[in-house]
Each structure stands twice: as structure tokens, then as C-alpha cells.
Image (cartoon, rainbow, N blue to C red):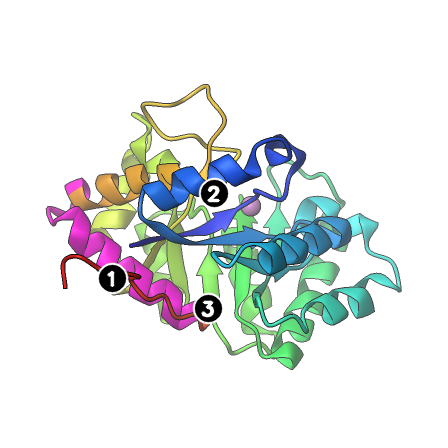
Amino acid sequence: MLVDTHSHIEMSDFTSDLGEVVARAQGCSVGAIICVGLNLSDSARAVQLAQEYPCIYATVGVHPHDAQSIVAATYPQLEELAQSAKVVAYGEIGLDFFHDLSPRAVQRERFAEQLAIAARLGLPVVIHDRDAHAETLAIIRSSPHRRGGVFHCFSGDVAFARQCLDEGFYISITGVVTFPKAQELREVVEFVPLSRLLIETDCPFLTPRPHRGKRNEPAYVSLVAQALAEIKGITVAEVALTTTANAEKLFGISLREEGSQDG
Ligand code: NI
């Protein structure tokens, strides 16, 4: 069984065929899909989907792109949403100094504030870090948050991966690992112990080979598992077993193989 630990199936890209998307994922042994909130309304939609589908779990938070959309009423409403039993983490939050869609000073402040909220809620965090590695870690270190979390769609090198591991974080790998140019990411996968790796699609973005050019979806997390198995020289079953156990531990969820045929 696999877990897609980071998806955006709450986005309008999936409105017309979400039932089929979820069914295809289940057909590819995806036992759970984490639906990650990007802003207040998007987080509300993620929580709603988690309530509709047993295999979907949600996170709530405001992405660095939307940091400047945060107003006084935003945080109490996110905290209210976080009371749902299906909310398993806070995020995605962090810094994006590549797109710079919100001013950097605003991104820094809203990131620190949300780490404090996550700490108060007792939730792990889903971190978005793009071209801001050192500063992202520095803000985490100076925050009261000690519950750990995941660097999603990891984009650093081995040295930065080591620092994230030292800080107690998991490293999550997307379909980018299947791209020809992603040699540095493959080195990170080789370096990071399987016990600290998670897999994700970040769908509808970052479609893995051989489906590039099409919309990404949770079923394709199986291609990420396959890539990890090839890089580490182990079986897909080993990747599935350990990364799913990692996801269960971090997000506090428990997946049972229903009607398991292989005992
Ligand atoms: Ni995302």
C-alpha cells in the first residue's frame, strides 16, 4: 500500500472527475491521499473532501504564494478547520524566493506565525521551500514548533538534506525524481535513509515520466515509488512498506490492508 502524502485534488482541475481519480488511485494500491491546503478557501475544500472520502486526509494552512492574502480573520478560521479529525498536519507553509508571489518580508512573518499556530495545535508541518533553504531552516529553528514535519517536493542537495534530517524532518520526493535532469535529487534519494523518506505527487503539477504533459494524479505516486526502488536497489514492496509506515507515523494515521490476500 502507498500513500500520496501531498496532493492538490481539491483544485478545480479535479472537480469534474474526482471520483474516478480516487478510484484509479485505489486501483494502484494508494491507500491514503493527503490533500494539502493552499489558502483559507482551499483548506476548507480539502477538509470537505476528507469528510466525503474515507481515504482522503487534509491539511490546512496558507502557502507562501498566498501569504499576503492573510487577514486578521484568517487564522481563527484555519484553527477552526483544524479541529476536524481528518486534519493531519498544518501547511503548506514556508518560503518561495523563486516565484516571489508575496513580498519576502511578508512571507517570513506569515511563516513564523503559522509555525507558532501549528505548535499550539500540536500538528506536524508541511514545508514548502523554494530557493530559500537556509532561511527556511533558520525560521523553523527559531520557532516554538517541535512536532517535526516534512520538506515537501525536496529541492536541495545532500548537505541540506542532512540538515533537515538533523532537525527531525522527513524528506518528500515527487515525480521530479523521474526527470532526466534530476541527478542531484537522485543523489539525495540515495543518501536519505528509507526510514526518513516520503513519496508524493504534488498533483496536478510535476507529472512523472512517462506521463509528462498530462495532468498528474495520485495514482502516479506508484511511479515515484518505482523510481526510489531503482535508485536504492530495493524492491517496490520495500519502498511501499517503509514510506507508508513513515506517513502513518508522521501524520498519525493508521491504514489497514483490507481483505489482504498476501497475508
Ligand atoms: Ni503543494
Of discs 2 and 1, which sits in the foreground? 2
Q: Amino acid at mark 1?
A: Thr
Q: Is residue 53 magenta?
A: no
Magenta-colored segment: predominant secondary structure: helix
Describe residue 151's horizontal placement relative to residue 138 as left or right: left
Residue type at tag 3: Phe
Q: Callout 2, which amino acid?
A: Val
| Magenta stretch contains residue 240 | yes
Residue in front for this viewpoint, 151 or 13: 13
Q: Image height check: is 37 above or below 183?
A: below
Q: CA distance from mark 2 to mark 1?
A: 22 Å
Q: Which residues are magenta?
A: 230-251
Question: Residue at horizontal 62%, vertical 51%?
Answer: 95
Residue 102 appears in which quarter of the rendering? Answer: top right
- Label 2's element? helix
Q: Is residue 49 at all visible to an observer of this figure?
A: yes
Q: Position of residue 129 (x, y in %)?
A: 54, 50
